Amino acid sequence: MDVVVGLDIGTTSAKAVAFDAEGAERGSADVPYELSEPEPGFAVQDPGEVADGALRAAREAMAAARDGGARVAALSCSSAMHSLIGLDGDGRPLTPVITWADIRASDQAERLKAGHPDLHGRTGTPLHPMSPLCKLVWLRENDPHTFAAARRWVGIKELVVHRLTGEWLLDHSCASGTGLFDIRERRYDPEALELAGVQESQLPELVPTTHTIETEDGTPLVVGAGDGPLANLGVGAVRPGVAAVSIGTSGALRVVVERPVTDPQGRVFCYELSDERRVVGGAINNGGVVLGWAGDALAPDLGDHPEAALLELAGQVPAGSEGLVMLPYLLSERAPHWSAVPRGAYVGLMRHHGRGHLVRAALEGVCQQLAVVLASVRDAGNEIREVRATGGFARSELWRQMLTDALGTDVGFPQSREGSAFGAALLGMQALGLVGSIEVAADLVQIDEVCRPGPDAEVYEGQRPVFSALYDALEPAFRALGETG
């Protein structure tokens, strides 16, 4: 039995899962690591800790598959997008992993957005502090010594691939999330490089997502893609009109298209999945992290793992939280506004609201934000008639139904909860010729449950105009608060 191990290098852990050619799991491993916020706006990680965790997860999953009698045909990689690491001439990190959640480059992003609005259309990457382009400009202006010392700039997946193969390779998918890559020409964008102050020679070699190279122990490695595009493949959402939504630490909603598409209003991204497929959509910063915050801030008495108790409290409150709305922008926000300005806010708070209301409104805010992203993707000219979902939130029946009601459409939940790892494995199978095409690979996805909108959908639809309008109404206050620290 041949298996392909999908390695997903996520924000807070690395997950590796071995799948056979029928899509069944044959071994897995999960290795957590830290995301640090040493200063306001910073969100960084230790490069060695993340790379070691990813390699350990891969080794353990491969060993589990072999112990079960399988042959590991390949390792295929997925990774959180938008990370940046500066390296010295010997490949040693000079910086931590600057993650997608790091917003210190807010001023640089606003300046680039105002002065170079055409960059988004060429690169597919919104001008937001998550973008490595904006991070590079920040480093050049605020840490010139480190910037000048760096001989190479990579993301976390490129570091892991280098540890496995000795090569510096950047797939077209992760490249399309850097702000440095022309998505139509499939090359580094000269203007973006000039603005960043880097040379093409300082960046990894660009390769297709199905590019295959042997690791040092002889195992084929499929370089793979970004976690968002691969999540679409992992839930089988690769045909026109089928969208994928995910809620993990953050969240996203995406639909696959056959050619590069950008939104003149700049509300959605366009990232590559394969030579024939791109993914259009929007990411939100605040997914499961909002429930984690609720546990820390609202329920410290419930212990170290209060998620189940918090969800039970939320389930005791009616949809709409009796007039309480939360804007869940604890880590600022991405789609559809792509701004580091917004902050979290409760609006409509009254004496009768209790802890359950605060928790439910927070979860509803996440779902409403994804509904706003869905509307933006549709407004950009993309038909969506079916939605499939994955992520840690799917373990909660309450949260599954809440998202379904907020989106106002049927939502399918696949058998495998590891969308990006499964997507990486499926892409690896296609690269090796174990399946004939991405569509055939997507057909291996089994839908376990279809959740349909209930009576609460009408409540969320009625509340959404208020939710959407609050962003514009509060933006001046958010800016003022940012200026005062």
Image: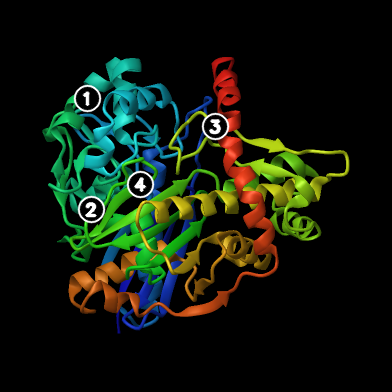
**Disc 3 marks which amino acid?**
Pro
Label 3: how many residues lie within 10 Å, few (<14), some (14-19) or many (20+)?
Answer: many
Label 2: how many residues lie within 10 Å, few (<14), some (14-19) or many (20+)?
Answer: many
- Residue at image location 28% in from the left, 47% down from the top: 262
Q: What element does badge 4 sit on?
A: loop
Residue receiving disc 4: 81
- Residue at image location 50% in from the left, 38% down from the top: 333
* 443 or 122, nearer to the observer: 122
Residue receiving disc 3: 342
Disc on the earlier residue, 4 or 1: 4
Residue receiving disc 1: 195
Rendered location of residue 110, percent (x, y): 38, 25
Instruction: From this view, report whether residue 84 is shown above or below residue 394.
Output: above
Residue receiving disc 2: 260
Rendered location of residue 191, percent (x, y): 16, 29
Disc on the earlier residue, 1 or 2: 1
Q: What element does badge 2 sit on?
A: loop
Contact (Cβ within 8 Å) of mark 2 with mark 3: no
**Disc 1 marks which amino acid?**
Leu
The nearer-to-camera label among 4 and 3 is: 3
Instruction: From this view, report whether residue 429 is shown above or below residue 11.
Output: below
Contact (Cβ within 8 Å) of mark 4 with mark 3: no
Instruction: From this view, report whether residue 230 is shown above or below residue 291.
Output: below
* 199 or 165, nearer to the observer: 199
Label 4: how many residues lie within 10 Å, few (<14), some (14-19) or many (20+)?
Answer: many
Instruction: From this view, report whether residue 219 is shown above or below residue 449.
Output: above
